[in-house]
Image (cartoon, rainbow, N blue to C red):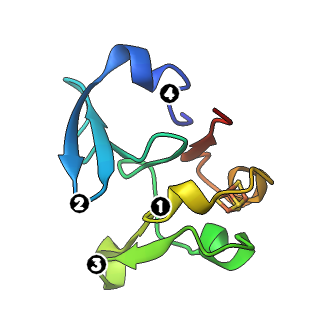
Amino acid sequence: MPIDPNFQASRTTKVYENLKVWKNDTSSLGIYGTDVAVDFDLCVGDGACIEVCPVNVFDWQSAGADRKAIPVRERDCIYCFGCEAVCPKFAIRVTKP
Ligand code: SF4
């Protein structure tokens, strides 16, 4: 199952550092980010988005098997949609404001 495209309407938010985290009753870790959103419950940390992003929006969070790609610089996004295309779990949704 891919990231919920309606997560902004169906989930409530908390703030983690400079990002919103979107959760509902069925989420565990939640979706990190808004315009560039990564579902941490789907992310397997393969790093394809980190490699493809031309403006380094993502950083690693945690390490080893628990690592996730966190969109810490989502405001730098140029909306190329490369990260959406390469994610093997369809865990990323980019929304041009
Ligand atoms: S859409 Fe492009 S620029 Fe934006 S985070 Fe994804 S890979 Fe980076």
Q: Determine the image quadrant of residue 9.
A: top left
Of badges 2 and 4, the one in the foreground is 2
59 is higher (above) or lower (below) than 11: below
- Upstream in the sequence, badge 1 or badge 3? 3
* Whole-number angstrom distance, CA of label 1 to CA of label 3: 13 Å
Task: Classify mark 3: helix, strand or loop.
Answer: loop
Q: Which residue is mark 2?
A: 17
- Upstream in the sequence, badge 2 or badge 4? 4
- Upstream in the sequence, badge 4 or badge 1? 4
Task: Classify mark 1: helix, strand or loop.
Answer: loop
Q: Position of residue 81 (x, y in %)?
A: 76, 50
| Residue at the extreme top | 9
Left or right: 96, with 4 as reference point: right
- Could you tell me the amino acid type at mark 2? Glu
- Upstream in the sequence, badge 2 or badge 1? 2
Q: Which residue is mark 1?
A: 71
Q: Which residue is mark 4?
A: 4
Task: Classify mark 4: helix, strand or loop.
Answer: loop
- Could you tell me the amino acid type at mark 4? Asp
Q: What's the mark number on residue 62?
A: 3
Work out whether residue 31 or residue 15 is closer to the camera in this orientation and state it: 15
Work out whether residue 32 or residue 91 is closer to the camera in this orientation and state it: 32
Task: Classify mark 2: helix, strand or loop.
Answer: loop
Locate ligand 1 by image quadrant: bottom right
- Upstream in the sequence, badge 3 or badge 2? 2
Any atom of ligand 1 within 8 Å of the CB at mark 1? yes
- Could you tell me the amino acid type at mark 1? Pro
The residue located at (46%, 57%) in the rendering is 43
The residue located at (65%, 71%) in the rendering is 48
* Whole-number angstrom distance, CA of label 4 to CA of label 1: 17 Å
Q: Position of residue 31 (x, y in %)?
A: 37, 42
